[in-house]
Amino acid sequence: MPQIRTMEIPESVREELESTENVTGTAFGLKQTREEGITDTEAIVVYVDEKRPEQDLADEEILPTELEIEDETYKVDVQESGDVKMLEQAMRPTEPPMEIAEAEPELEAIPPGLSRKEKWRPAPAGVSVGHPDVTAGTLGTPPLRTADGRTVFLTNSHVAADSGDASQGDDVYQPGTYDGGSANDVIGTLIDFSEISTSENNTTDSALVEVRPDHLQSDIFEVESDLRSFTDAEIGQRHTKSGRTTSVTTGKCTARNATFNVGFKHGTAKFVGLDVFEPIASGGDSGSLIGLERSDGFYGTTLLFAGSSSLTLGIPMDAVQQFHGQLEPMTGRELVDPDDLRITGTAFSTSLNGGQTTARWSGPWNDRYSVDFRAIPTTTDGWVSSSIESVYRTNSGVYYRIHMENRRSNAPVDCDVKYVVRR
């Protein structure tokens, strides 16, 4: 499919269309039909909450079939959007989660679900994250460098900054509170965010969280390619995202330069300049980076933030960077010790009673890495031995089972299990 241009819809045309009852948004994109699905035909797309037969509409509710703009005639395509909302994990659990069936005996200690909802250190893009006052969204990007040299990741304001109700310097948890995150799970600090307005047009729903380099992987979970750069979304082309709830999904960009009314906790906010995709997300996927997978890497185009059962909405990365300044993807080499290309950090902390021996799984780790582990006592006079007992490979990565022994028979000891990642 040839690349479709993006046209600016005159504001007077938008205002007239959006003043019609039931209209939720407008965009320039591709016409869709029940028989053919997404076509190659350019159109002015008008989104409505619910499509109704023309005979059921009042005269003032009937939209034109064509519009003339700058001496060109465009089809008007009416598409159903449904109820468009921000895609934070909306509800807190009201009952304990269902028990997971037991795995094979030799694997029973592996955390269930290969979970994007677990605590990850270092964390890849695509896992659970959130402000303490928010349920959960998605850690959107591998590490980025800001214009002033800080190491950050990108997600939504409504995920990391409570839609602007938070303060700079607030902690951000990984995983988010809906997934069990607490003050023990701080991954970084909120340093910049957009405030969501109900009275003025919004151009972005984004936030930057500053982190230590050893807290992030340079990977997007279950996406083969590393983040190479940012570019524009391409109408008609298939894009990919990796999110907390629906994992890796793909869908076509159906429209750009969209204006939409989006529901959130304070009411309805009007967003302009959006990218529109087929439905590729659900609650908890907010903050995911949408992009194009190419032979030389993953090119981020759009920050996912809202949607419905009919479509997914995102902020173009151009708009995100207009607000936050230039953001540059960091390579794995930039995150490691320049002398030996290593990343070090704490995988987990644990306590052992006198003479106790135990084992615990860590992972999944990307199989491009070579990972080693060592338990370091944090208790005075603590004495601990450790080793990798076994290794288990899955489709999502590699698990390591770490064996630990308290060599003091009469005293408990606390320890941190440190990892070393070689690339």
Image: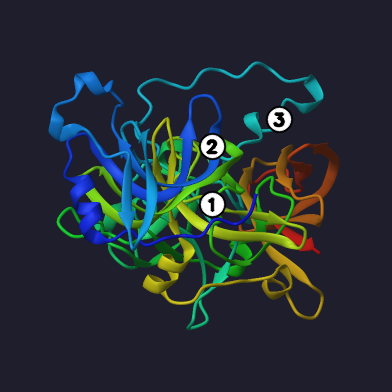
Question: Which quadrant of the figure has residue 337?
Answer: bottom right
Query: Residue sitting at 54 percent across and 59 percent down?
Result: 301
- Total marks shown come to 3
Relative to 315, is 330 on the left or the right?
right
Along the viewing direction, whichever of 212 and 322 lies nearer the viewer: 322
Which badge, 3 or 1, is on the more N-terminal residue?
3
Q: Secondary structure at mark 1?
A: loop
Can you say whether 408 is above or below 257 in the image? above
Q: Amino acid at mark 3?
A: Ala
Label 2 close to label 3 by CB (< 8 Å)? no
Q: Position of residue 27 (x, y in %)?
A: 37, 50
- The residue to which callout 2 is attached is 38
Residue 155 visible (yes or no): yes
Amino acid, disc 2: Ile
In the rendered image, which quarter is residue 24 located in? top left
Judge depth for marks 3 and 1 and give the one in front: 1
Disc marking residue 235? 1
Q: In the picture, which quadrant includes the C terminus? A: bottom right
Question: Which residue is labeled 3 in the image?
Answer: 109
- Name the residue nearer the viewer: 309 or 22: 22
Quick one: 9 or 188, which is closer to the camera?
9
Q: Position of residue 278 (x, y in %)?
A: 50, 38
